[in-house]
Structure formats: structure tokens, C-alpha cells
Image (cartoon, rainbow, N blue to C red):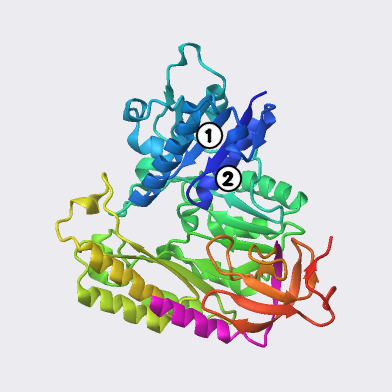
Amino acid sequence: MAKVFFINLGCAKNLVDSELMLGLIRGNGYEITDEPSDAEVAIVNTCAFIRPATEESIDTILELAWLKQKGRLSRLLVAGCFVQRYGRKLIREIPEVDGWLGTGQIDRVLELIKPIKGNTPVMFIDRPLFLADHSHPRAHTTPFYSSYLKIAEGCSHRCSYCIIPALRGPYRSRTVDSLLIEAKAMVEHGTIELNLVAQDTTSYGHDLDPPSTLEELLEALLTIAGLKWLRVLYAHPHYITERLLDLMDNEEVLCPYLDVPIQHVNQEILRAMRRPSGNESMYQLIERIRRRSRRIALRTTLLVGFPGETEAHFRELCQFVREVEFERLGVFPFSPEKGAHATRMKTTIPHRVVKHRVRELMEIQAEISKELNQGLIGNTLPVLVEGLCQDTDLLLTGRIATMAPDVDGQVLINKGSGIVGEIVPVRITEAHAYDLVGRIAKGSRGENHCGITS
């Protein structure tokens, strides 16, 4: 059987799609290799949400096309959002690619791996309606102790800057039963940290018949023995319910962490983004979350440079960030995307201004993050051990429950030893803008030396 090289680009939701394709490929006897030069078939699962992601997808495809031209690959396949966005014109523009899969056709990947008579490029693309469930094979690429569970696909919001509904189709939830079966299987195979993902996790279940809710799903998942951390990502700010906050307040397994992308705080800009706040302002939302007895760490993303964003709008956003003091924050420049309503707006912001605003907000957040982290010095916190530090074998790395994988900081452990995938008590001794430093607490296994035990 042919060796297959697979590369994933984009977000955690895309990663789950890649794992589904890899599950099909591996389950049918193909060998997966980490080196494209060793492979006969290369597959790229692409992102095209914004221009930089599109450019990365193109660059990756062209690099592999070069290998194919040199005779080191026999077939090159491309899947995902890039295909869904640009469609059949790609066959003409990148003729080196042998097969294309839209976001709703990833379950047909096996049909493209084998050479097709005549070597004519083939594209499988249609309106995205595919929804994988627990019966679809999946090859996990994340560390054994941590997994992503995609609870829904697509999006039915109509934010003016976003093309996700066109790329992913309408919002469609998986059933609680299907998700519970998959989650139990993950935990049986070693997962102790489960991260729920969707374009909007808080809209979960509203489209089902009968309807369900994210809270009902969480209550079901919390019954799984052996699950240590359960985390909610991509929560829309308009659907943060009291019941959800009650669960976070009372359930130890449910991480005190909410990823709530608010994008902006100014009401005029939010209306232009088609993200009206309804009867609750962003300040009121944050106050409602923060009044809980259990401190819930908040991560958000902000979009700056949106058409019509004045200096006064931006100053209002800066003040909001200073007052709210998010634990985690990402800032992105507005990217005009063809097909998005905001691209047609005339009041554009100069690139140099947008770049400066991104930098200023990140500098504000760095100060806030450092101050909040310094407040943790002297505390002993549960840390999930992830392995040796990439830069030195003298340090271990891990994360606390309020650090999501891949997007947040880490805990550097400079004294003690731990088993990868275990949660150990770590006393925090130093704090930086994004990372913490600590040592295994006294009385814990391996407290006298740094390293990994097996």
C-alpha cells in the first residue's frame, strides 16, 4: 500500500476533520509517514478563513507540487476550506493537484488516493452537509491525554466579516448520544482532557429534534468516569446562560475557563459586524461571569481595523480591555474577504494604523497577563504534565486548567518529575506575561529531580 503524508492547516475544528480522513486512510491499510519525501501520496487539509490562511494554504500546496514535479510524489490531494472557497477554477490554476475535496466531501478521501484512469484531476465539491458521528473512524494526532470533540459543524450566524457559513454550511449539531459514545471511547483510550469545539458551542442542540442544549451535553459528559478536565471553546457571547455558569461553578471537572470571542465592545461597530449585543452589554456579560464564586478565566478574540472603526472606537476598546482584565486575549486585524458583506464597506482603515492598533492592544494585554500571573506566585496548582521543554531537557512543560492546548501559555517545571499525561501539584515560583514557572510540590513523587518518569 502507498505511504501517505498528511498536513493539517488551520484551527482545532480543522484538525478533527484531518483526524477523520486519517482514520479512513489508516483503516484501509495505508501507512502514514511524517516525511513528504518518503510518501507516494500527499494530502493537505487547508484553511481559507482569512487572507493569511489562504496564502499559507497556497504556499504549502506549491511546495508539495514541486516535490511531485521532481518525481518524489505520485499524487497530490487538497481538501478543506480552500477548496470549498475557490471551487473548480483551482483545477485550472493549480494543475499539479490530482484531487480536490470540499469541506462536505472529506469522507470521500479514499476515492482520490488511488490513481484515476487518464490522470484527469477530480474535484468532489457540493454544499457542505456532511456531519461525522461516532461511527466514523478517527486517528488521533493530539497527545494521548488530550482530545478535541467536535460537537457541531457549520454556522448559521451572519457576521458581516465572516465567510464560514459559505465554507462550512449551516449549523448542524451531533446528538448527545453520539458524542457521549465517542467521548467515552476517548477516555477509555487515555484521554483525561476533553476540549469541546464547534463554530459556536453555545448554540449546540437548538437545531436537533427534539432540541437539546450545551448544558445537557455537559451534564452527560460529566458522568464519564476518568475524565479529569472538560473545557468549552468558541462560546458565543450572546448565549452564555446562567445554567452554564452554574455548572462551571459547581463541577470540578468542568474547567473554569470560557473562550468567548467578543470581537469588539463599541455598539456601533458591533452592529456593523452584525453582532448586536441585545439587552446585555459586554460589561454586563463579564460582570455576570465574574460574580461567580469560582473564578472563571476568560479568553477572547478582538477584531481591529473593521471598516468605520474610528480612533474613539479603538480607545473605547482599549479602555474595556484594561478594565475587564481578560486572562487570555488574541487580537486580529480585519481582513477583507470576498463574499463577506464587510468587504463592500467603504470606510477602510489604513494598514499601518491597523497594525499599530493590534500591537498596542497586545502590549496592554501583556501587562495585564503578567500582573494576573504574578498573583498566582506562591499558589500550588494542578498541572497537566506534557513532556520535556522543546528548548531544553532541564525543564518539563505542562498546563493548568485555565490554559487551553495550542492557544494559551504553559507552565515550565524546573524541579521535580512527572509522568506525561498525569496531573500533578505544582507550586508557582515565577510568572511572566504568558507562562508560569514552578516546581513539583513537596510530598509529590519525584520532587528531588527534574525529568520524566515512565
Instruction: Select label 1 or label 2 by which is in front.
Output: 1
Q: Secondary structure at mark 1?
A: strand
Q: Amino acid at mark 1?
A: Ile
- The residue closer to the viewer here, 97 or 187, is 97
Q: Verify whether residue 365 appears in magenta.
A: yes
User: 219 or 97: nearer the eye?
Assistant: 97
Which three-letter amino acid code belongs to the residue tagged 2?
A: Thr
State which region is magenta: 363-387
Exactly how many numbered labels are in the figure?
2
Give x and y (percent) for residue 383. 70, 71
- Quick check: 295 left or right of 276? right
Q: Residue furthest top?
A: 118
Label 1 crowd (10 A; few <14 / some 14-19 / many >=20): many
Label 2 element class: loop
- Residue 412 occupies quadrant: bottom right
Q: Which mark is residue 175?
A: 2
Seen from this angle, which residue lies furthest left?
346
- Quarter of the rendering occupied by the N terminus: top right
Q: Residue at x 38, y 48 (%)?
A: 49
Q: In which quadrant will I find the C terminus? A: bottom right
Give above or below for 296 relative to 323: above
**Disc 1: which residue:** 43
Classed neighbour count for the residue bearing mark 2: other residues with Cα under 10 Å, few (<14), some (14–19), many (≥20):
some
Horizontal side, residue 195 vs residue 77: left or right: right
Image spot of residue 11 (x, y percent): 49, 51
Q: Quick check: 90 above or below 195?
A: above
Residue drawn at x 70%, y 67% as measured from the top left? 384
